[in-house]
Amino acid sequence: MPSSRRPPVGRPPRSSAPRGPGSRGRPPASEMTTTERSRNERTPEDRSPKQGAPNRRASKQRRPKERSRKQQPPTERRRRSDLGARILVAVPAAIALVILIDLGGLVFALFVVALGWACMHELYRMLERWKPVTVVGFGALAGMVLAARYGGLQQVTEVAVCALPVLFLFVLARPQRGGGTVAIAGTLLGIYWIGFALAHGELLRELPHGATVLIDVLLGTFLGDTAAYVGGRLFGRRPLAPQISPNKTVEGLGCGMLIAVLAVYIAGVYQPWLTTGNALLLGIAVAVLGPIGDLFESLIKREARTKDTGTLFGAHGGALDRADAALFTIVAGYYIWYAVIH
């Protein structure tokens, strides 16, 4: 007896034709739209990636090369670029410094004040938690350099001595209480470390042949510093002071000291008024005190947890990073040359 059921209105009757293995879940051709029919009729060539789409197989072959290139440590490229950047900054700075030393007078004194303020700003920024009185530090440094220009060592000492009571009054006038001792200590560190050294540079410039001796001292200081850097990179094995500066090595120290002595000695060969003994004496003082000044600044940076004091000289770091060794060698050069000419 035929079934009295009718298919639902609007729904086509199910086809009893068997479906192939590849037609599972796919509607019959009669029910497909034109877009679906054209999609199923495409050949494998038509189903290939569109033109301009990235080839997955080719990209998979290129990925290991790109990844290995990224994973390679670029030590050599970093060393070359770092050394090249240092040279690009050092050569113009050295030429400008020689010109200013040769000019002398108030121009050189004002340059020394500006350099000292840059160094002192970087130091006080590292010691910010000590809350140093920056205005007293800047004023004392300028007064000491100008006293060296228009007076002498006695006037420089008088300015430095007067800085202490003035500093104490400024600390008392602060609204907040506490921390006065470390504020005084941090401020005086900048005055007696940076201010005294740069004032001695001005004093050395005013001595007979002082401009040339100052250039000799700075030449030995900076060439010795560069030789220590390069020698440590090439031959460094044993750390010099791992707790203060882990990158400094004994081999780098030896290279720097040798080049410092040779630089001052060779400069003295072309200066008839500078005897061999005096040139060697200046060279040895530079070779010994330059690394001490460098380690002194490294100790302060280690305590302040700072890598570079600033970015004024690009790859060389800040002004204090460049002047740290010279702040010791200039003072030694002044007293050695003062003793020689007297």
Image (spheres, helix red, strand yellow):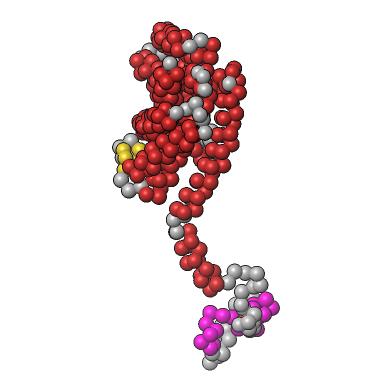
Residue 141 image point, x, y percent = 48, 17
In the image, 267 versus 153, the foreground residue is: 267
User: How many numbered discs sit on the rendered protein?
Assistant: 0
Q: Which residue lies furthest to the bottom in this view?
A: 1
Residue occupying the point 52% across, 22% down: 209
Q: Can residue 128 be seen in this view?
A: no
Q: Is residue 39 visible?
A: yes
Residue 219 image point, x, y percent = 49, 33
Q: In this picture, which residue range is highlighted in magenta? A: 19-39
| Magenta stretch holds residue 131 | no
In the image, 232 versus 131, the foreground residue is: 232
| Magenta stretch holds residue 27 | yes
Residue occupying the point 64% across, 80% down: 46
Up-down relation of residue 90 to residue 24 (above or below) = above
Up-down relation of residue 243 to residue 65 (above or below) = above
Up-down relation of residue 264 to residue 62 (above or below) = above
Which quadrant is the C terminus positioned in? top left
Up-down relation of residue 121 to residue 169 (above or below) = below
**Relative to residue 30, is residue 183 drawn left or right?**
left
In the image, 335 versus 256, the foreground residue is: 335
Residue occupying the point 55% across, 72% down: 58
Answer with the quarter of the image where residue 13 lies. bottom right
Residue 54 image point, x, y percent = 59, 69
**Relative to residue 103, is residue 272 drawn left or right?**
left
Q: Which residue lies furthest to the right in this view?
A: 34
Residue occupying the point 59% across, 17% down: 106
